[in-house]
Image: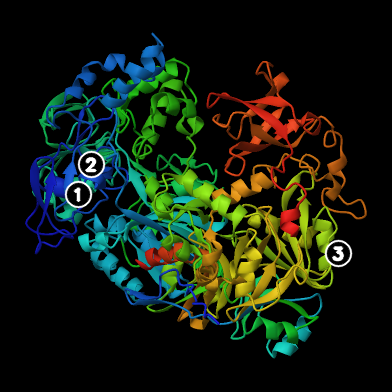
Amino acid sequence: MADLAETPADGGLVDETFDGLRIAAEPWRPLASIQPFRGRRPEVEAALGARLPDPGRRSDAALHIALDQWLVEGDAAALSDSLSGLAAVTDQSDAWSFWRLSGADPRPAVARLAPFDPADPRYADGASLRSQLARHPGLVVIEPGARAIRLACPRSYAASFARALREAALA
Amino acid sequence: MRLSEGGLIDRDRTLRLRFDDRTIAAHPGDSLASALLANGIRLVGRSFKHHRPRGLLGAGAEEPNALLGAHDGARHEPNIRATLAEAEDGLRLRSQNRWPSLTWDVGELSDLAKPLLGAGFYYKTFMAPAAFWERLYEPVIRRAAGLGRLSGEADPEAADKASTSCDLLVVGSGPAGLSAALHAARAGLSVILAEEDFACGGRLLAENEEVGGLGSADWAARTLAELAQAPNVRVMPRTAVFGVYDHGLYAACERLPRSPEQRRENRPTRRLHRIHARRAILAAGALERPVAFEGNDRPGVMLASAVRAYLNRFAVLAGRRIVVFATNDDAWRTASDAAAAGAHVTLADPRPAEALPPAPDGVQVLPETLPTATRGRLALTQVHLRSPGKSRWVEANILALGGGWSPSVHLACHQGGKPVWRDDIAAFVPGEAMPQGLAVAGAAAGAFSTHAALTQGAQAAADAAEALGRAASAADIPAAEDAPTRQHALYVLPGAGKNAYVDFQNDVTAADVKQAHDEGFRSVEHLKRYTTLGMATDQGKTANVVGLAALSDVAGRTIPQTGTTTYRPPWTPVPIAVFGGRHRGQAFRPTREAPSHRWAAENGASFVDSGAWKRAEWYARPGEAGWRDSVDRETLAVRAAVGLCDVSTLGKIDVQGPDAAAFLDFAYSNMMSTLPVGKARYGLMLREDGHVMDDGTVARLADQHFLVTTTTANAGPVFRHLEFLRQCQRPDLDVALISVTDQWAQIAVAGPRSRTLLERVATEDVSNDALPFMGVIPVTVAGVAGRLFRLSFSGELAYELALPARYGDALMAHLMQAGEDLGVVPYGTEALGVLRIEKGHAAGAELDGRTTAADLGLGRMLSKKKDHVGAVLAHREGMTDPDRPVLVGLRALDPEKKLGAGAHLFAKGARRVVANDLGWVSSVAWSPHLGTMIALGFLVRGAERQGQVVMASDPVRGRDTAVEVVSPHFIDPQGERLRG
């Protein structure tokens, strides 16, 4: 049996530091989308053992990514079994490229990509926001206290977005 | 000249700049303007139209004359306002709009021709011959007139954008702005303090006065230090807030000084800020205006406040012999400060002696006196003063004009608000209609004393805090100058005519205003367009009120009766590049790469833009003379052996839920609920108007689980359409949608040997029995789980193999290796297009939004057993007309003749007129299989014309090609290959 090599989703931006701001591509890990069927959200949350965060919010268990749609870490097939009849589950492990911005305050760099200010106090407790990022479709995950921000784009945009991310990191 | 002490400059360091052919010295803290003045340079430019010598008029954003070109080569930037730009070591500056030199400018001849160049001259002259306008007149006029010129090269400087938010945006850092920011900060608001100058402090830096027992500049510095320590305050010098937009959005442009090293790193030199402010305070101060009289534009004629600013902030005495013309008490401070600095000062004031303040030490005061003329070719030498019963020429190298103050109301009026006139201060102030959440404080509101500004700033901050639910901090107003405003309304002096300039930047004189009025341009908006009064880079900051007064004088109206023109963004010029930001060149728009992009690039692929995608269009091989060789080879290989094409770019939408089948029945024209699990079906999607929106396949992966594919171009629109149906039209259905386009690397494996290849790589049985045409099975390749669809776009036995996207590159390599002895080739979008045209598959060129299912030969796909989007309107009159052009195949009779998409079809011998138009050619390819050009097109009564010859007429490309009408299925019309 041949082994198939994996192409990373980092778009060429693996781990670089700009004026103290470290931008590191996150390694591949299983991700799945969860969309509870009508009226089944409590059962889904019970099965997951965690509450699904409100729109625009994040939790340690899940990111809200769209209307009635969450992203969780975990094997899609296993989740599909455990949530059978309760929610639509899809494998999203290869659909996204994630980078983590940490070290120096990441908010100014993100403010140069996004049409909103990540330093707005309403995001101080953390947020998960779908947004255009330098015209790329993106996801902004602000960790509580904004010590770090995770940025994501669909995998196919990774190289293009990595270029924009490098530019935004130059204050 | 620079004084030996004083000023807010760092005398320990000396900067060297070049201005035209001179090297000038400056210090950190100098503006370009103060550096020029300190070096005795008073002639800084030539005027726009008349090429008259011009010097510095102001010291801030209002400056109309001192526009310079900075840097050489590609970095050259025209129209730098010398009063706002700071001195930099090594900076190269050039004067503008002169030839061959600033001192000797041939264009000055136009000043002699002034009688011919009056208001709107270009509307009345150069009318004939008509052909001369574009070829001669306009080029000559454009060359003769104007400001700076662009380099014509790509700008190497980077710009970017940022989003910022705050509780309170304070625009301006003078006494009102600093007071507002300080009180708001103490109240706990998040504050942005934006200042367009490179130093914060506004007039506090320019005055010789005390605030709170400190020098005004020291008080400003102390306040700024407190603000700098506050975590909730962001002080932004070099930041011009230039526009107010809806919902508290303010646009600002920040200049970012950069070292050569930072420029090499491509760091931005300008940044566009989108500031979302819950509240804002306009504390932009006021602009002093000149008065209009003969010869009021010579170098050396300055605003009184500017003379004071150069003296107090930069320690530059503008001249040794100064005449001050004051229409208010404020300008007297210029006389006082200049005399204290050692200048010989004469103060002329139109008011009677009994109305005047006590004469400052060392100042000769002339009551009831007006300036009526000036002398000096390149610089002022004399001023003519006229008093009752006496007139005289006075030696002077500076004439300081204090014509009154105009509050900077611009931002307050950007959303349509009109300013209102106050006679007591002879100025417009903001009216009641203001942008929501914006307050005005200080001189911008007509409160000209320092104490009033400090008080209003604090009050506006308190109001903002209260509005935001915060407790205001205790008002802390330091002792400060609080003189009443005593303004004598005077704008255009008696006798002002053809050399009495109202608008310095556009060379508009009092005579021009009168002429425009006499010619019927009596509305202020018409006056502006006809004379250009108030246009260009300064937008009439010093000109507007004087111009209104001139118009009012000739029209016999008051200034408020005349009214103002409309205030629009930007407050100050903003380079277009700032709006583009980083989105230029390669980053003009985002791009997407398919999962096997790296493999394709390493294997000779050329890429083509398909929406945002970069798709492999062909793979060149050594020895191939051109793209046609590559495409022909790839096409024939698919027909004869097996080919691989990355089709991951097709949209893939996962549809799940108890009502998923019903939902798809509604979205598609044909039935999907009857599709068995493990099977796929071609689907046709209509718009509500009955036209075809998109096509694709629907695969049923489980009872309540479907996978929808779309065309590459329509992936986004189809997903949006389905979401609209889900949320708005069929909220009764319980269904979940999500894109999985990026999750999967999907490779088309097409050709008669495709099954053999897949048998080698797949663990599962892929025989015809196990996986018949339009079947779907789970599959494992090299230990990786995926899906295998038996679909064909080429007309050959074909599959689409899907594995997670991270394996895309490796999967292509794996398949190529496994199929080497089978003759496997990668093929690109060009071969894909040839194959689908040969097979007669409709694609984007056929699904152009104008075609119906019947046009495409798919009329039977409109199910009558169910409702679906477009079901009603697909049957309306006109949509079912038998004379509508329908899809046909077209085959060039002469293989040597070219055929192009877009050609229109005519009967042989018919005139090429619309009435004879029978249809059009939509897709064209050279078919290596058939050895001729083939096409798909739409032809009236196409089915009946099979076998006939029609003409494909392409007048744009000069082609007229005879084509035979044939079936659109050029190969395997019975579909035996793909089912084999």
Residue in front for this viewpoint, B667 or B749? B749
Q: How crowded is mark 1: few (under 14 residues within 10 Å), some or many (20 or more)?
A: many
The residue that label 3 is drawn on is B673
Q: Which chain carries label 2?
A: B
Identify the amino acid type marked 2: Leu
State the residue at coordinates (17%, 54%): B314
Relative image position of residue B879 (x, y in whole percent): 82, 37
Please tell me in which quadrant of the rendered image residue A128 appears.
Answer: bottom right
Which residue lies at the image location 74% right of the left edge and 89% below the top edge? A46
Looking at numbered disc 1 in the image, what kind of residue is underneath it?
A: Leu
Residue with the mark numbered 2: B68
Q: Which of B152 and B466 is in front in this view?
A: B152
Q: Return the residue at label 1.
A: B32
**Do the residues marked 3 and 1 share a common chain?**
yes
Task: Report the residue that reaches farthest toward the top.
Answer: B129
Q: Real-space Cα distance between discs 3 and 2?
A: 72 Å
Question: Left or right of B146: which side holds B410?
Answer: right
Circle 3/circle 1 CB separation < 8 Å: no
For the C terminus of chain B, the image quarter is: bottom right
Q: Which of marks 3 and 2 is in front?
A: 3
Residue A24 picture location, percent across and down: 42, 77
Q: Extreme left residue here?
A: B4
Q: Distance between the residues labelled 3 and 1?
A: 75 Å
Q: Which mark is residue B732?
A: none
Tell me the CA gap for discs 1 and 2: 9 Å
Q: Quadrant of residue A1?
A: bottom right
B859 sits to left or right of B358: right
Given residues A48 and A9, the one toward you in this image is: A9
Give me the chain letter of mark 3.
B
Chain-order first, disc 3 or disc 2: 2
